[in-house]
Image: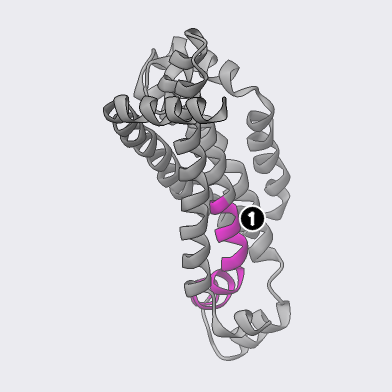
Amino acid sequence: MIEPLHLFFINTVMTRSDDIWEGMVEHLFLSFTAIFIAIIIALPLGIFVSRQRKLADLFIGITSVFQTIPSLAFFGFLIPIFGTGTVTAITALTVYSLLPILRNTYTGIITVDQAVIEAGRGMGMTENQILTKIELPLSLPFIMAGIRTATVLTVGVATLATFVGAGGLGELIYRGLSTWNNQLVLAGAIPAAFLALFFDFILKRIELRATPKGLKRQ
């Protein structure tokens, strides 16, 4: 009994290969456009609140509130503003990606050993040099962990983009649920899970390559 189901799933993947490939391309576009925008917003904001710590709770709290809104409901809230389509999906995914990057950037910078920072000042470094040559390199593991978390989260939530007409692998999952076709659901869910794990692995390797040698030894 298991073998026919296994063969039926393979047949579904083969016959729907064009749909799966198209869904993966759309899924990647939505996810990584959102991650890119989130990094552009959250990384400078994390640096800013590390300098203005009284504002940290405010900004992190705002992004935390958005994180508590159910994903599908948040997509729905944006439809009256942006309509259906790619813009709504990317906007929602970007907002969901902000918290891990912002919080980890802030945490990484404020936990840098103050003795190291004072040593840099003693050597005549400017505040900008301290940031780029001391704080950011030493906080890189925190920042990359935030980006990795945001990437996995975004790839998963992007399956809901189909409900606002933005496509992606969620389209296959929705079709499968609508027709009680579990094989079609898996044909969308398995590639989405694979993409999340694959890019988490890639970002982990980038993190290890970019981490200063002293931190690697620690």
Q: What residue type is labelled 1?
A: Asn
Question: Residue under circle 1?
Answer: 104
Q: Magenta includes 135?
A: yes
Residue 217 vertical position relative to residue 204 in the rendered view, above or below: below
67 with respect to 37 (left or right): right
Q: Which residue is drawn at 47% across and 51% down?
A: 198
121 with respect to 186 (left or right): right
Q: Which colour scheme is used?
A: one colour
- Please give the range of residues in magenta: 127-148
Q: Where is residue 85 in the image (x, y as percent from the top left)?
A: 36, 18
The residue carrying pointer 1 sits among few (fewer than 14), some (14 to 19) or many (20 or more) residues within 10 Å by Cα, namely many
Residue 98 vertical position relative to residue 213 in the rendered view, above or below: above
Which sits in the foreground, 67 or 31? 31
Most prominent secondary structure in the magenta stretch? Answer: helix
Say what secondary structure mark 1 lies in. Answer: helix
Quadrant in which the C terminus is drawn: bottom right
Residue 46 vertical position relative to residue 215 in the rendered view, above or below: above
Q: Where is residue 109 in the image (x, y as percent from the top left)?
A: 64, 65
Quadrant in which the N terminus is drawn: top right
Q: Residue at x 64, y 58 (%)?
A: 50
Q: Position of residue 14 (x, y in %)?
A: 32, 30
Q: Which residue is drawn at 56% across and 77% down?
A: 134
Which sits in the foreground, 36 or 200? 200
Residue 62 vertical position relative to residue 129 in the rendered view, above or below: above
Q: Residue furthest bottom?
A: 123
Instruction: State the count of labels.
Output: 1
Q: Magenta includes 124?
A: no
Write down the quadrant of residue 121 in the picture: bottom right
